Image (spheres, helix red, strand yellow):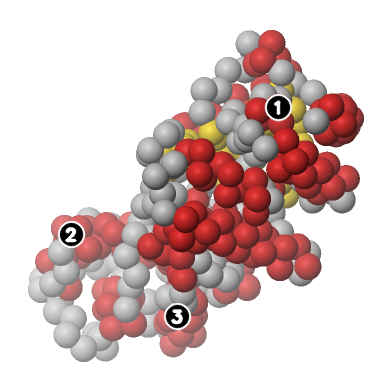
Amino acid sequence: MSAPGVNFPSPIPPYCAPVPQNIFPLAGMGRALGHPSALKIIAGGKLRQLREACALTPKQVAGRLGFSIPKINKIEHGNLGCNPDDARAFLALYRVHEPRHVEQFLELLEQSQRPEYWKPWRTTVKDFFAPLLALEGAAQRIRIYEPFYVPGLLQTADYAAAVIRAEWPDRPEGEVQKTVELRMARQAQFAAQRELGDAPDLWMAVHEGVFAHSVEDREVLRAQIERVIERAERGEVAIQVAAPQMMVKAPLASNVTYLRFGLADLPDAVYVEQLASADFHQDPEQVEEYLVRLDRLATQIRTPDESVAWLKQQRDRL
């Protein structure tokens, strides 16, 4: 029986590929559980798979369900949530009638609609930064190259405040503190995942100049270096420090973050940040290009053990 409000004008596809067993259960979502934006992408991807299995185009679906093509595209790419009524309409059109499958998908949607942990700081988050913030905790592995500052996931509160004031000297102090609070909340989120044994593996390559002059206050910088050493020795992060001459064979001009999800329904991604903007790529070719560069970089710079030894020397010089 059709879902309420669903109209099937002729012709309709005579055949849709059988729905795979266990296509929707949350048990297969890995670290994506607890990360609503990741679940939106997964849910949208599954709707796209079902549509393609029925040999339907977005235009045909739009005509049959009375939805706009942009709405369908946004839902399939995880940029727009799907409400339960729309979900039932999609599933009915795609010949998904098994109650168990319908309930599994609705449960997935319910999880995807939960508020993000960073919602209290939403007005502080730049639009270009939101995709990284929303998805980083769902990754199996995170690889970062940072040429200018200690990565935010390792920053002390004092270092973060100093960096923000240096980057945006006209920013009101209240906004500075909100941004610092958000960075600390990110770290707390990762710490909570670590307690559960479910945190992403972290690898960071940082230009050595960051540990010499990224902030003016030597005590703040010394405390920041101590934090990095501590986290590295705990095994929470693999840190590699790059000298300028080491970068010749593996040049990277800006901040790069690679996210490895390990899920068929959640493509790996690369976040490339510039001064006032960023690009978030999930195209496999672009992601692979950055991954190759990060792999090459790791072979050209100090090893993790050499990097910790260098950091201790640099700390003692300050």
Query: Where does residue 61 sit, x and y in percent of width and height?
Result: 20, 65
Nearest the eye: 19 or 4: 4
- Residue 172 rendering spot, x and y as whole percentages: 41, 54
Residue 216 in view of the camera: yes
Q: Where is residue 200 drawn, in percent x and y?
A: 69, 54
166 with respect to 124 (left or right)? right
**Label 2 or label 1, whichever comes before in sequence order:** 2
Determine the residue positioned at 47% across, 77% down: 114
Q: Nearer the viewer, residue 242 or 43?
A: 242
The residue under the point 55% across, 23% down is 252
Mark 3–mark 2 Cα distance, whole angstroms, equals 23 Å
Quadrant where the image shows the C terminus: top right
Binning the other alpha carbons within 10 Å of mark 1 as few (below 14), some (14 to 19) or many (20 upward) gives some
Provide residue 55's location: percent of width, then percent of height.
Answer: 28, 57
Q: Secondary structure at mark 1?
A: helix
- Which is more foreground, mark 3 or mark 2? 3
Q: Which residue is the site of mark 3?
A: 110
What residue is at 53 percent from the left and 70 percent from the top? 117
Quick check: 206 left or right of 102? right
* Residue position for label 2: 69
- Please tell me whether mark 1 or mark 3 is closer to you in this view: 1
For badge 1, the amino acid type reads Ala
